[in-house]
Image (spheres, helix red, strand yellow):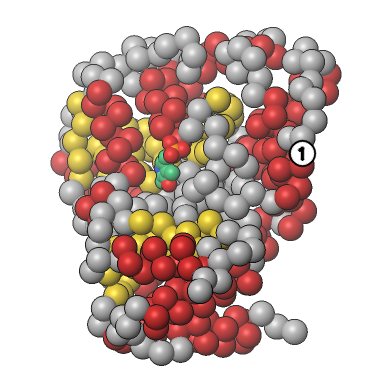
Amino acid sequence: MVVRAGREFLAIPGPTTMPDEVLRAMHRPALDIYSDTMVQMTASLLRDLGTLFATKGQTYIYIANGHGAWEATLSNVLSRGDKILVLESGRFAVGWGNAARAMGVDVEGLKGDWRRAIRPAEVEARLRADTTHEIKAVLAVQVDTASGAYNDIEAIGRAIKAAGHPALFMVDAVASLGCMPFEMDAWGIDVAMSGSQKGLMAPPGLGFVAANDRARAVHKTAGLRTPYWDWTGREGPEHYNKYSGTAPVHLLFAQRQAIDMLFDEKLENVFRRHQLLAEAVRRAVAVWSEGQMLGFNIEEPTERSNTVTTVAMKDPAPLLAYCKDMCGVILGVGIGDLSGKAFRIAHMGHVNAPMILGTLGVIEMGLQALGIPHGKGGTEAAINYLGESVAA
Ligand SMILES: *Cc1c(COP(=O)(O)O)cnc(C)c1O
């Protein structure tokens, strides 16, 4: 007997659930890519990306996933042989750094740990030691989607400033933009990037980049520039220039609708919703952990992200299979160093209380059905927290 008929729920950290309005927005003919409507839609998206990143800098839209947007950032500001510092906190900044290495950049990793966030003091110390300013850029992710770490980007920005180091500060906000505060200009970020398919609730396929004047000045002499990614080309006067070719019309319809929904809800409310639902997940995991079979991957509570919770567990495969095959809830697998040793509960984007409480209820049901020792009442703890926090 299974209880999975009904809508399957994708609780993985991207692609995330798309609102029906976003799906419907794509169900229409393409626009003439030279029409005013098209030109205005592009202008509105470039402007609103500036609001999402909180920057007065330039924004760019690529037909690419996050990996493509990574390459866009690197190729526009670096030259072969440049040295960069990658701040490790799991898998994603390291992946960005690996792309840079493959492009001929000299990559140094600031050793981190899969169980904690980046330590700003260590960043400051490393940069102070670089007295000749060999390091051209510092790369970090706001949320590492593999470890579940939340990095305090504002504090890292302050650390770079305190070291008096001129390196560009480049931040990956793929798993956080539109879910939690991001303040590119205020936090001293020079280049930021994200993608359409996580907090921004649209299909995979759009990569977003923002660059301030300092980055655009460095760009002028960057040796890794190539035509498709090149910012200067994209700043050309024709609409055609903005995409280095045909606009991804339907993805833009979707992204336009999704951003309208975020702005209608108001970003501060969107951030608060994510914080509440993430805390509900954490309350449940904390209770289940009492059984000693599973626990938070990130040890320090303030370093746990509001978009994904990584739960360390020996052999999570049977639990994931139960949730999927019996109940129609698809959880994220552990990846990288946590492959086969963790699962992930995504709570980013178009999520509400029933989606999260339903997911938690199904996980608890699976723990019970499989006889996995766990503290009882995790879902109830989540309900109690939300009941107290979301006032009538
Ligand atoms: C998902 C993700 C990426 C990669 O995005 P793709 O669209 O899969 O290429 C990069 N960084 C972070 C933090 C992510 O979560």
Q: Residue at x 70, y 83 (%)?
A: 391
Of residues 41 and 205, which is closer to you in this image? 205
Q: Is residue 158 above or below residue 208?
A: below
Residue 194 x, y percent position in the rendering: 50, 39
Residue 52 x, y percent position in the rendering: 61, 44
> Is residue 96 toward the left or the right of residue 189 in the image?
left
In this orientation, does residue 89 appear?
no
Q: Residue at x 80, y 30 (%)?
A: 28
Q: Pointer 1: what residue?
A: 25
Amino acid on which disc 1 is placed: Ala
Q: Quadrant of the C terminus?
A: bottom right
Q: Residue at x 26, y 78 (%)?
A: 293
Ligand 1 is located in which of the four quadrants? Answer: top left
Of residues 51 and 257, which is closer to you in this image? 257
SS at mark 1 in the image: helix
Q: Residue at x 76, y 47 (%)?
A: 21
Please identify the quarter of the rendering in which residue 234 is found.
top right
Of residues 63 and 58, which is closer to you in this image? 63
> Is residue 236 toward the left or the right of residue 326 in the image?
right
Residue 86 x, y percent position in the rendering: 27, 40
